Amino acid sequence: MGAGSDSTVRRAHPILFGSIILFSIIEMCIAAWLLSRYNTRHNYPFPSVRIRVRYILFCSVWTIVVGTIFLVLFWVTAAGSIFTSVAAHFIFLFITFVFWIAAAAAITETLGGGLSCSHQNFWAYCGQLNAIEGFAWMIWILVFFTLIMVIIRGVAAARSGGGYGGGLVSNTA
């Protein structure tokens, strides 16, 4: 792994993880507000809608908490900790990838691919549901690209003899 790719990872990691965390915070706020409305007013169209919004809230909190831990650890010890290794990043990102693909697919299926808010009266909070769906797919895309980046770094680390337990960046950078 060359010094040029190390500097790219040192720049890209905080940007990707920061974006994932930022969009997860937005998603968490929308989902929490929507659940609050559903729980107090009981105006959810189907129980499955409320359950899926709860799951999206869980995915958001998971991503914020664990993603922040990985981001802070990367800033502190980018090359010197098992928690900042290629393998640890892969495990976290793969689990998060599965969570978000399930969340995005579930809410998309529930909404039938999206709602046209100007042509319906059945769905309360139509705009918020569309926002939850959009942010879920956007977070999934960011996690997917970050996972691909980690896989590429893992292959490079394995070829250079560092193995998958090595850091995303080399110790000499």
Image (tube, rainbow, N blue to C red):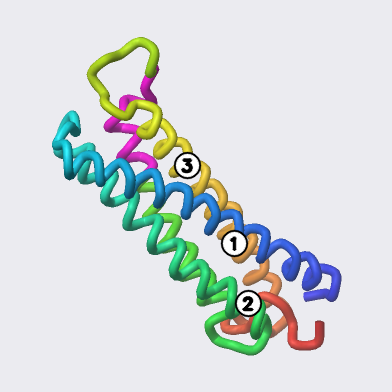
Tell me the quadrant of the picture where the N terminus can be found: bottom right
Q: Residue furthest front?
A: 40
> Which segment is the magenta one?
104-116
Q: Earlier in the sequence, mark 2 or mark 3?
A: 2
Q: Is residue 45 left or right of residue 109?
A: left
Q: Give the number of the disc on residue 75.
A: none
Q: Residues within 10 Å of mark 1 (few under 14, many from 20)?
A: many
Q: Residues within 10 Å of mark 2 (few under 14, many from 20)?
A: many
Q: Main secondary structure of the magenta part?
A: helix
Image location (x, y in percent) of residue 32: 32, 49
Residue that carries the numbered disc 2 in the rendered image = 74
What element does badge 3 sit on?
A: helix
Mark 2 and mark 3: span between their CA atoms? Answer: 25 Å
Q: Amino acid at mark 1?
A: Phe
Q: Is residue 76 left or right of residue 10?
A: left
Q: Residue furthest top?
A: 119
Q: Amino acid at mark 2?
A: Phe
Q: Is residue 19 above or below residue 49?
A: below
Mark 1 and mark 2: span between their CA atoms? Answer: 10 Å
**For the point 21% across and 41% down, which residue is it?**
50
Q: Are marks 1 and 2 in contact (CB under 8 Å)?
A: yes
